[in-house]
Image (cartoon, rainbow, N blue to C red):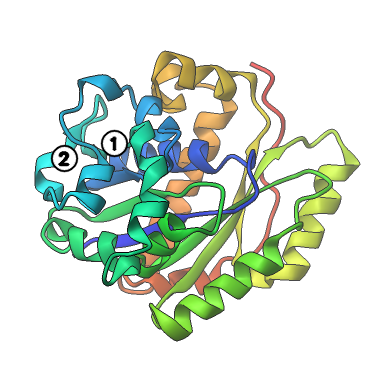
Amino acid sequence: MAKITAIANQKGGVGKTTTAVNLATCVAQQGKRALLIDIDPQGNATSGVGIEKENCEYSVYDMLINGISAEKIIVETQVEGLSALPARIELAGAEIELVSQMSREFKLKNALKGIADRFDYIFIDCPPSLGLLTLNALAAADTLLVPIQCEYYALEGLSQLMNTVKLVRINLNPDLVVEGVVMTMYDARTRLSNQVVAEVKKFFQNKVYDTVIPRSVRLGEAPSFGLPISIYDPKCGATRAYTSLAEELLEADEGSGGGSEGSESADGGTNGGTDEQ
């Protein structure tokens, strides 16, 4: 049965989709069967793995609203071992359409029951909000991974996110675990990046991954070519960072017998640097 991880932060521009795309890719490249679910109406994770949205017969919207099975929606990507459930812009209307439906917070969880045994890992790229789409992801997930950028307002809104997690545990998913926090856009040359990492460690303590993701020109270029960074530029620092993050996640799971509680042992660290390639 797959381990399901929601990648969420209601603050935009933190590297959430970049992390979803590249972590899922690197996990697949480690020999695991991975599924990337895009529940952000912008569909950036979909295009980030090279899927042409207009060529998809169905999307996540059809799965959540029209009852189309996930099996019919799965698209194979150019990365061996990585599949995807694509999103298109009509998903923006799902927030409103779900309001009147029964078990509205469990639509995604129920839809995944038929395919979860096909994968080792499922990663859900959430929209930058705490609406019904993100609640569906948190209700379906075993763990939550939070990307946080190394910038001044990094901790802004995180209390609200953690409060939402508490409410989800009480009302929807008592087994939800905070997988960990990954620091993104790290620049080793600036004092600010190191200060932000220190502040985040105070807030999350041992939940911060050792691996940090560097600020990278190449990482910003890759989505325009519909390629994960490890394919676009296998030798750049961002590729090494996401490969390291995938290895850290897998090692934590193996250390806990494959369960989601392996992240409890993740200590903080700053192994990253800048990558101006």
User: What amino acid type is highlighted by mark number 2?
Assistant: Ile
- As rendered, which of 121 and 251 lies closer to the eye? 121
Image coords of residue 186 (percent x, y)? 72, 39
Residue bearing the label numbered 2: 73
Image coords of residue 15 (percent x, y)? 59, 39
Residue bearing the label numbered 1: 86
Which residue is located at x 23 percent, y 56 percent? 120
- As rendered, which of 219 and 189 lies closer to the eye? 219
Determine whether 165 is above or below 219 in the image: below
Which residue is located at x 59 percent, y 28 percent? 237
Image quadrant in which the C terminus is located = top right
- As rendered, which of 97 and 179 lies closer to the eye? 97
Image coords of residue 38 (percent x, y)? 36, 42
Image mark for residue 6: none
Image quadrant in which the N terminus is located = bottom left
- As rendered, which of 233 and 54 lies closer to the eye? 54
- Quarter where residue 121 is shown: bottom left
10 Å neighbourhood of mark 1: few (<14), some, or many (≥20)?
many
Determine whether 196 is above or below 48 in the image: below
Residue 41 as seen in the image, left or right of residue 216: left
Residue 31 visible in the current orientation: no
Residue 111 visible in the current orientation: yes
- Quarter where residue 31 is shown: top left
User: What amino acid type is highlighted by mark number 1?
Assistant: Pro
Residue 259 as seen in the image, left or right of residue 135: left
Q: Secondary structure at mark 1?
A: loop
Q: Are marks 2 and 1 in contact (CB under 8 Å)?
A: yes
State the residue lying farthest toward the front: 100
Residue 197 as seen in the image, left or right of residue 192: left
